[in-house]
Image (spheres, rainbow, N blue to C red):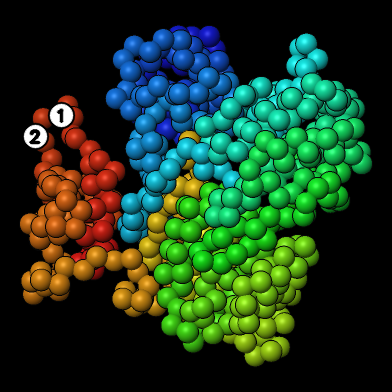
């Protein structure tokens, strides 16, 4: 029987989407329910029914999941900044790792790809070094500073945020106090009236430097110099107060023109032992500590020995390429945004890096120029935006015939799509690692190594070696007992023959007729948990069976 709008159903939540919603099934139809957790048994009211799925609202929690925790945030879930405050961080990491596995397996067509466990954050709170805070008028006309509610432009007034460092609250408290004296007119997005659009704050965690930027529908605000004085007194490490002019009727936060009110027009931060200049318009990863782990991993996959030419496409301000420069022969960064290229060149000069150069061009123009110079990159690094690479970009990168391609992705679905096209052009994914740069949100980064030939595991792969294991007789694959021993020694997990057979079937490997199948027609066969599936897949690749 088909479900209909306003129907109330009971269902078990069996997974989480990238948007933080739980998903269960009613008569085979997927139902997405915000604020639920995997393992919940929930009473849900159906709000919308599409052809193959439905959306629902949690009416009653019949049996809570063991993953549930108190949110510790007054604004959750009204504020759209966080999606997973209702579950433990460990559960969030499991869900994100599974998203990457599902995307690469189902969309990409790589069910047997070795995917290492997700790299979580040591500090899942207070990690953001950038905040773009919309400004609006409250019901009483007072200034509201906060974040957009999920899937809307309705601002939820937030006095504090668990994702931000303590210095950001000092900034917002000071701005609220200043607004009580000077009464700036908040921007009305619908009417395109009012002046104060956004409060934009940046923080150099490695240096302690703070920048405050006022985004204005005009040239400035009354009392901006007084605000700068109040911020100097309240915010340790303040280095810059800037006005950004954005007169356009747009959802884009920043305009092109900046004016310094006080201090310098930038701050600096330290990343991977290098110093980077950060202006209001500069791209910089919002989680510095996790970015260092991400870049270190990308550097390992690049497998540099000092003789390689590295082409860094989508280089932005040069952060990834510059962190690899000390181990490369030459770094060539390519970026289409002129200001980003200028920042990248300055970052190279400030860090005394002489083997890096940057081209302001698209990929096809850069490839043509390098070909004219007789340069063939040994390694290509790709760090595209959320939409992934264009089909042309994939063809250009593969056409340069590098030894390795390191793909840094911020969206598992577009990563899987691009990896599939790279595979069709001869570049197969060798290994992938999810990295959580954005705890408590639905986003997850992934680093993937692609290559044509056999990879030197000592130089590139993040691999575990069992040197004392007897490898004799493995020519035709390992036995179930050998796989169990490998998984136990490397991962500390005990796996059953049933689980091994399930994963072998996924990989198209022979497991023998009716192996480990129950004789009961209605028997419920336990399914291999994700962490054990990953460990078994790792073993199959180790024994060269998949």
Instruction: Residue 125: give x, y in percent of width and height.
Output: 47, 37
- Using a 10 Å C-alpha cutoff, classify the residue at mark 1 as few (fewer than 14 neighbours), some (14 to 19) or many (20 or more): few
Quick one: SS at disc 2? loop
- Using a 10 Å C-alpha cutoff, classify the residue at mark 2 as few (fewer than 14 neighbours), some (14 to 19) or many (20 or more): few
Residue at 53 percent across and 49 percent down: it is 287
Q: Quadrant of the N terminus?
A: top left
Residue at 51 percent across and 43 percent down: it is 127
Answer above or below: position of 254 versus 267. above
Query: Mark 1 = which residue?
Result: 523
Query: Mark 2 = which residue?
Result: 519
Asked whether the residues under the numbered discs 2 and 1 touch, taking CB atoms below 8 Å apart as contact, a structural biologist would say yes
Let me know if residue 370 appears in the view. yes
Quick one: SS at disc 1? loop
Let me know if residue 419 appears in the view. no
Find residue 505 and name its label.
none
Quadrant of the rendered image containing residue 484: bottom left
Looking at the picture, tell me which residue is in the foreground, 225 or 363.
225
- Seen as rendered, the residue at the extreme front is 233
């Amino acid at each position: 029987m088909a479900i209909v709008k306003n129907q109330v159903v009971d269902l078990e939540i069996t997974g989480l989407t990238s948007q933080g919603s739980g998903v269960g099934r009613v008569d085979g139809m997927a139902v997405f329910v915000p604020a639920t957790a995997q393992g919940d048994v929930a009473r849900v009211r159906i709000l919308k029914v599409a052809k193959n799925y439905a959306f629902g609202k949690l009416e009653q929690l019949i049996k809570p999941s063991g993953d549930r925790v108190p949110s510790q945030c007054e604004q959750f879930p009204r504020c759209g900044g966080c999606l997973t405050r209702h579950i433990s961080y460990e559960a969030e990491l499991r869900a994100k790792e599974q998203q990457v596995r599902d995307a690469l397996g189902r969309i990409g067509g790589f069910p047997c790809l070795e995917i290492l466990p997700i790299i979580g954050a040591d500090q899942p709170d207070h990690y953001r070094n950038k905040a773009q805070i919309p400004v609006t008028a409250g019901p009483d006309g007072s200034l509201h500073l906060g974040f957009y509610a999920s899937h809307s432009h309705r601002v939820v007034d937030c006095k504090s945020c668990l994702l931000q460092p303590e210095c950001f609250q000092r900034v917002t408290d000071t701005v609220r106090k200043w607004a009580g004296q000077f009464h700036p007119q908040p921007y009305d997005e619908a009417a395109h009236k009012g002046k104060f659009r956004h409060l934009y704050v940046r923080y150099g965690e490695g240096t302690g430097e703070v920048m405050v930027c006022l985004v204005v529908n005009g040239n400035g605000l009354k009392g901006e110099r007084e605000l700068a004085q109040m911020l100097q007194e309240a915010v340790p490490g303040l280095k810059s107060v800037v006005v950004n002019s954005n007169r356009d009727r747009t959802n884009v936060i920043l305009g092109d023109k900046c004016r310094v009110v006080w201090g310098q027009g930038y701050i600096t931060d330290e990343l991977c032992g290098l110093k980077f200049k950060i202006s209001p318009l500069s791209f910089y990863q919002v989680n510095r500590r996790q970015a260092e782990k991400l870049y270190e991993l990308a550097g390992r996959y690049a497998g540099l020995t000092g003789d390689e030419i590295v082409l860094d496409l989508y280089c932005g301000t040069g952060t990834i390429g510059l962190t690899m420069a000390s181990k490369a022969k030459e770094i060539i960064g390519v970026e289409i945004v002129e200001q980003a290229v200028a920042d990248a060149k300055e970052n190279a000069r400030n860090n005394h890096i002489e083997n890096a150069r940057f081209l302001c061009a698209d990929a096809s123009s850069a490839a043509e120029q390098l070909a004219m110079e007789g340069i063939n990159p040994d390694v290509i690094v790709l760090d595209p935006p959320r939409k992934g690479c264009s089909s042309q970009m994939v063809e250009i990168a593969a056409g340069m015939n590098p030894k390795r391609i390191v793909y840094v992705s911020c969206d598992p679905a577009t990563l899987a799509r691009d990896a599939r096209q790279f595979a069709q052009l001869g570049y197969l994914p060798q290994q992938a690692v999810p990295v959580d740069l954005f705890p408590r949100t639905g986003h997850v980064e992934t680093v993937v190594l692609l290559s044509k030939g056999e990879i030197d595991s000592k130089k590139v792969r993040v691999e575990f070696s069992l040197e004392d294991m007897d490898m004799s007789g493995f020519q035709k694959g390992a036995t179930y007992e050998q796989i169990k021993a490998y998984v136990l020694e490397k991962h500390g997990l005990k796996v059953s023959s049933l689980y091994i057979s399930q994963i072998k079937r996924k990989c198209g490997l022979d497991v023998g007729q009716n192996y480990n199948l129950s004789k009961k027609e209605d028997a419920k066969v336990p399914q291999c948990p994700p962490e054990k599936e990953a460990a078994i897949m790792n073993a199959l690749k180790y024994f060269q069976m998949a």
